[in-house]
Image: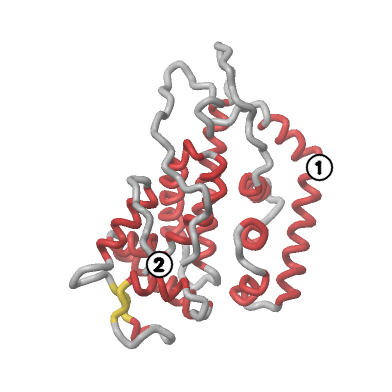
Amino acid sequence: MPSRRELTDSPFDTLEKTFDLLVTGPRPLALDGTTISGLPDRAVPLGELKAMLLHPSMSFAVRDRVVDVLVARAKAEGGAWSVGLAGVLLPGLRRAVWPLVQSCPDKADDIEAETLAAFLAAVARCQPGRARLAARLCWLARIGATRLLRSELAEVGRPAGDLVSAAPPRPWRHPDFVLDHAVRAKVLTDHEAELIGATRIADSSIDDVARELGIGYWACVKRRERAEQKLVAWLLSPTYSSIEIVQKRAETPCSSSGSRPRPDRRTDRRPAKRRSSPPPRR
C-alpha cells in the first residue's frame, strides 16, 4: 500500500483524520450492504465503501443509491453520519476546489472551510433520489467557495486611503467565477452550469456524464453545446463587459503582497500548506 502524505490541520485534512477515526477500530461506522444491490451482503465500513465507490468497476446506479442512503442518514441523524458522508465525498470536494486553492493559496484554509459549510448546507436542502447527487453536492460546495472569494475581492476593492505596492492582479476570467456569475444572472440553469463545469473544468467525460444523466452521448453533447452557446453570447454582450470592468478595479486578496488591507483588519499570516499538484485519484 502506498504511503499517505502527512495530514495538516487544514479543514479538509481535519475532516479526513476525523473520518479515519470513525471508520476504524472494533466498531467502525458502516452501511448495511444488504439493502443495496451491488454491495457485499454485510455491514460495509465507510472507509471500505469510499474505496469501492472510487473504483471504475462500480456502476453509476450503485453509486447514486449509496449516496442517496448516506444523504438520508446525514439529514436524519447528522453527527457522525454527516462526517461520514463528507468523508466519502472528500476526494470529489478536493478536486472541485483545487483550481481555486491553486489560484489563491494564501486563502486555502478559508476556501476549504467555506466549501464544507456550503456542502453541509446543500445536504440539508437536497432531496435524495436526484441523478448525480454526489456531483451536484460537490458543485454546490464549489459555488459556496467562489462566493467567498468574490465577497473578499469586493471588500478589497473598496477605496483605500494609503498607496501600497501590489503585485499585478490575477486574471479575472476564472471559469468557476464565470459559471457562477452566469447562473446568478439567469443565463444558465444550475444543471447547465454543472454540465459545463463537470466536462470542461473538472475531469468528467461526456460518456460518464451521459450515463449518469441517463441520456445518449450525442444528446449530452447537444445539451452542452446549447448551454455553451448561451454562455458565449452572454460573455460577448455589453452586460458582461460592464460587470468585468467593475470587477477589475479590485486587487486580488489571494496574495499577501497583492492585497490592500483595511486599517482595522490584520493581515492573515498563516503559512500556506498546499500541494502544487491536484489530488490524485484513488
* Quadrant hosting residue 202: bottom right
**Where is mark 2, residue-wise?**
71
Q: Is residue 32 left or right of residue 255?
A: left
Q: Is residue 202 left or right of residue 58?
A: right
Q: Where is residue 217, by image quadrant?
A: bottom right
Which disc number belongs to residue 237?
A: 1
Q: Is residue 268 above or below residue 172?
A: above
Residue toward you, 71 or 107: 107
SS under mark 1: loop
Whether residue 75 is visible, yes or no, is: no
Seen at 68% across and 48% down, the residue is 182
Q: Is residue 53 above or below residue 11?
A: below
Q: In which quadrant is the N terminus drawn? A: bottom left
Q: Is residue 257 above or below residue 12?
A: above
Q: Earlier in the sequence, mark 2 or mark 1?
A: 2
Residue at 51%, 81% in the rendered image: 57
Picture coordinates of residue 71, whole percent (x, y): 40, 67
Location of residue 130 in the rendering, given as x and y in whole percent from the top left corner: 52, 70
Q: Nearer the viewer, residue 271 or 4?
A: 4
Q: Which residue occupies 71% across, 35% down?
A: 244
Q: Residues within 10 Å of mark 2 (few under 14, many from 20)?
A: many
Mark 1, Cα crowd under 10 Å, few <14 / some 14-19 / many 20+, is: few
Q: Which residue type carries mark 2?
A: Val
Q: Position of residue 77 (x, y in %)?
A: 29, 64
Q: Residue furthest front?
A: 2
Amino acid type for the residue under numbered disc 1: Ser
Name the side, left or right, on which 281 lies relative to 49: right
